[in-house]
Each structure stands twice: as structure tokens, then as C-alpha cells.
Image (cartoon, helix red, strand yellow):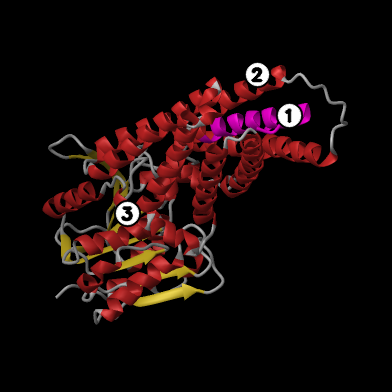
Amino acid sequence: MNTKPLSREFYSFMIFFLSISCIMALIQSGALVIIGSQMMGLESFNSWMWLVLFVIAVTNAALVRYLWHNSYRLAAVACVVSTLAVFFHYALILNRELRVFYQEHYHAVAFFLFGTAMLWGLSLVFTKAGEKRWLRLSGIVTVFIEVLLAATFVLYFQTSEGSTKLLIDKVSRWISLLGSLAPVCFVIHFRLENKRLTVTDNVPAQTIPALVKLAAFVGLLFLGFNFSVEAFRYSMPFKPSITDLRRSKAMESYHFVDKSGDSLHYRLLNPLDYDSTKQYPLIVCLHHGGAHGKDNMQQLSADPAPFLMELPTRTKYPAFVFMPQCPKGMGFSGAYGNASVDSLVFRTIRQLQGRLPIDRKRIYVTGISGGGYGSWHFISAHPEMFAAAIPICGGGDPQYGPRLVNVPIWAFHGARDKLAPVAHSRDMIAAIRKAGGHPKYTEYEYAGHGIWDNVKREDIMEWMFAQHKE
């Protein structure tokens, strides 16, 4: 062990950044508890993540210095490995190109994170660092939390029932919140270490550490506040506007319940000048991630729903428009093993077919973002049901390409989409074409995720209504 102790300024620096880490962990875990993975869609998410990475880098660099100085070499190496794993994880989330890799290898990345975090925790328990009570306790807490998270992760993806998945997801969020206890143990440890320091140094405060502390504090004050407020607002109950209420009066509200008790809220728009003696097409309109809930209202304002409800559209293209609302924590596609409401949607469609004059040769599906992924999933699961699909900013599993050869598809995507990687649409189109299909694909070179204004100027309704099953 080095004979010269670290300075009081160093311990003060460590205590400050570990305290900042505790606060940030509570903020982020709190956001995860109240809105789940939807926090990644917040406008402030990226800037918040850069602050998190900055604090992690500074804190763990100082921690490695401390561990190495005290000859806790194995713990220092484990800390470096765990930190690199965390940086790798966030790089996959924040980088548009790398996000495709992340989504395709999500399980492997998750277990890599669990493994490196457990290695870090174990190094604090079973190496020389474990002689320090609070370091050992931090290691125990870390291992315990990671084991619980890994267990809930496995259970989540092994369970097929949506309600059970939601319950497991909620449990894992609260476990993550408990994970903020580990930095608390470090704060206590360094406060005790500082008190035991017998050498009094009169070295004046250095400028660079002071500036780094100031940057972290100011960043937490502003970015942490914005992130917290946005997450809180997102969690608040939806308050419909006058436009929402006006739209809701134009279509009936329904609630489908299956034999197991699972339910689906949806709206149904009848054709203009509806004649029960005629058959009409059915348009399945899937909303994006921002309209999830159980109010049976938000999906009416989520594109492309307003466009389908406009009088010119209804006049020229009379059809039933079915707008299901996906509950929070679920999706339309079940992508990557997540909880899905797809089976309920299909059962509701079959019920509608039994009581309405729906032309079974002209059932269409369209949606944006989460609804785009849902559109790809729906035609992949039941290609025999749909006469055409218009998936926007979505993606699916390319292995289903051969099943979609005979399904008319017109897909859209923005080349600079940061939320839904454009590769997801490209891969689906390439897989279908390789299998002998001829899907249409429009990619906007300079557009991001918000491409609906571009799409609605295309002749999508004319193209869609020209399609029908033989």
C-alpha cells in the first residue's frame, strides 16, 4: 500500500461526486418507475444521458484511483470493466447507427451488463477491498440487485402472458430504484475515510476539480430538473383538448373483453353515409408510442388517425376505421419479446367481422412508429388477413420476408430517424424482395422520425384502396 495518503481535497471530491451519483440514480430510477422505458422518448433524455455519462466517468475514474492507491487492484480492474460496459450500453442507445445492433442483440447486451456489474460487486466482497465494511456492503447490495434484475429479466422474456409481463416489469423498476443504495454505501465509506485521515494538508483548492464539480452541479440543477419535470408531466393523466373531445364525438367508444378477462379499448369510425346493406373496407389504424393508455381518447389525435377522420378522406374513401388503444407498458408488435396486445386486436377484428358488413378482401393496416412496427408484425403474423399495409417508421423480423411476398406493402421511413432506425425498414424490404416480392418503399433522405407530413402528401389512400385480396 502506498505510504502517502490521498489528500482531503480528493476525499471531498469523491464525496461530492458520489452524492451527485446518488441523486442522479434516484432521479433516473424514479423516472423508470413512473413511466418505464418511455423515458427514452423524452426530449430531455439525450442531454440527461450525456450528463450521466460525464458523472460516471469522473466518479469512477476517481474511484479507480482510490482503489489502485490502496492496492485493491482486482477491484480497480473490475470497476474499469463495469464502467466500460455501461459506456458501451449507453453508446448503443444514444447512437442512431449502433441502436440497430443494440435492438438485435438486446439480450446479450443485458447479460453482459449484469455480468460485469456482478463482477464489480463480487470484487468488493471477496477481495482485499472487502476488509472495509462499507465497501463490502456496497458489493453485497450490487450483487443482490443485479441477481434480482437478471432473474426478472429472464422471467419477463419467458412469460407470454401480457398481464404477467407488466407485473414483472413493474417489479424490475422498483428493484432498479433500490440499486441507488450502492452509491450511498460509498459515500459513508469515504466520509469515514476522510475523518480517519490524520494528515492535514493546506494545499489550496485546485481550479480544474472545482470547475468539474461546478459543471456537475449546474448540469444536475438544470438537466435533472428538466428531465424530472418532463417525466412527471408524461405520467400525468391525459387531459383531452377541445379538438380531442370533438373527434371523440364522431366515433363510438368500445371495450372488448376476452374470456380470460383481458381487455382492449378501441374506437370505431363508421363510413360516411353508412349503408348497412353494403360492404366496406376496414382500416386498422395503429397509434404511436405517445398515445398509450386506457382513456380511449389519445389515439384519436395520433397520426394517421386525424387524417383518416377528415371529411375529404371519408368522402372519397368510405371505410370502417378501427383504432385500438394500446395500454402503457405494452406494444402492438411484441418486438424483442416485449408485452404485446396483438392477440386482443386480432380477436376484436374477428368480432367486428361478425357484426359489421366488412369486406374481408379489403382489410388494411397502417401506423407510425410503434404503430409502424405493429403494422409489420400484423401482416407477418396473419398475411392472409390483410389486403395491404402502410407501415411508417417501423420494422419487423426479416425472417418473415417470404411470408409477405404476396402482401401489397408501401413502407415509409426517414433516413435520419433517431428513434426508429431506418435499417429496420430497409431490412424488411430487402428480405421481401429477395424472396421474390415487390413492395413499395419511400425513404426521405433528409427527414427524421416525423415524416407524416411528407407521407400524407403521397397518394397513399388511392394506392391502398386499389388493393384487394383475390
In which quadrant of the rendered image does the N terminus lie? top right
| Residue in front for this viewpoint, 252 or 324 | 324
Q: Amino acid at mark 1?
A: Pro
Residue 192: mark: 2
Q: Please state the horizontal and vertical placement of residue 72, each as a whole percent of the image.
A: 57, 35
Q: Which mark, by number, is residue 335?
A: 3
Which label's residue is closer to the chain start, 3 or 1? 1
**Residue 247 in view:** no
Count residues near mark 3 (Cα–Cα under 10 Å), then give few for <14, some for 14-19, many for 20+: some
Q: Looking at the image, is mark 2 or mark 3 nearer the viewer?
A: 2
In the rendered image, which residue does mark 1 sit on? Answer: 5
Q: Are marks 3 and 1 in contact (CB under 8 Å)?
A: no
Dominant secondary-structure state across the stretch colored magenta:
helix
Instruction: Tell me the CA gap for discs 2 and 3.
Output: 48 Å
- The magenta region covers 1-28
Q: Residues within 10 Å of mark 2 (few under 14, many from 20)?
A: few
